[in-house]
Amino acid sequence: MKKFIYLCTLIFCLINSHSIAKENIMILKLKYGEVEIELYPEKAPNHVKRFKQLSDEGKYDNVVFHRVIEGFMAQTGDVKFGNSASPEFNISLAGTGGSDLPDLKAEFSNIAHTRGILSAARSADPNSANSQFFICFQSAPHLDRQYSAFGKVIKGMEFIDMIKKGDSNNGSVSEPDKIVSLRSK
């Protein structure tokens, strides 16, 4: 009987851990293909919660990658001025807006800003992250413990690499690529 209970408990734990893991996977659709992102709620719970909320409400759909710097990162997530399907879309203001929700407090961790890491974009104030985020093209150790990393691309990084790069001075992109959709798996 003990073996049966142990076996049932083991099966339950495996099934439950799979469903928990699946709820922290996001699918980012680009014109180039689908990107799978794993979120880290244990490291940045409030940033993950916000990201999932805005994603599942469709707020990131049609939002442009307004700042993309070759060999560094691709920034997006301005749901106010960066949504190319919105009447408020303004490419010159993209990167200055956010959502209607309050800003988030920093959740710095030991996650290194390596290739594929998602991190919260913010102003000089560490507690000013809102909806914008960036994806690292390669390691950026100068960002470690300075920005709230909350996820990582686990599949489809080759599609992130294809995002149109911006001006070499500041990364601003004319006619930028956009997020087709972003949802929980």
Image (cartoon, rainbow, N blue to C red):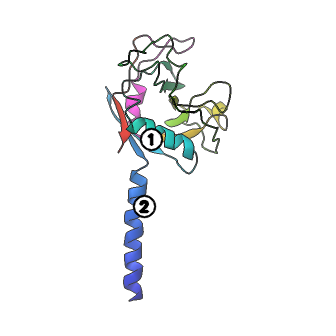
Q: Position of residue 47 (x, y in %)?
A: 54, 40
Q: Position of residue 158 (x, y in %)?
A: 39, 31
Regarding residue 28, the answer to whether it shows in the image is no
Q: Which residue position holds label 1?
A: 52
The residue that appears at 64% across and 38% down in the rendered structure is 106
Would you place residue 149 above or below residue 40 in this image? above
Q: Quadrant of residue 13?
A: bottom left
Would you place residue 20 above or below residue 109 in this image? below
Residue 97 appears left or right of 23: right
Which stretch is magenta? 154-174
The C terminus: image quadrant: top left
Would you place residue 19 above or below residue 45 in this image? below
| Amino acid beneath label 2 | Ser
The residue that appears at 38% across and 15% down in the rendered structure is 87
| Residue 160 shown in magenta | yes
- The residue carrying pointer 2 sits among few (fewer than 14), some (14 to 19) or many (20 or more) residues within 10 Å by Cα, namely few
Q: Position of residue 124 (x, y in %)?
A: 68, 24
Find numbered disc 2 in the image and state the secondary structure of the residue it sits on: helix
Q: Which mark is residue 17?
A: 2
Regarding residue 162, the answer to whether it shows in the image is yes
Chief secondary structure of the magenta portion: loop
Q: Quadrant of residue 17?
A: bottom left
Residue 32 appears left or right of 80: left
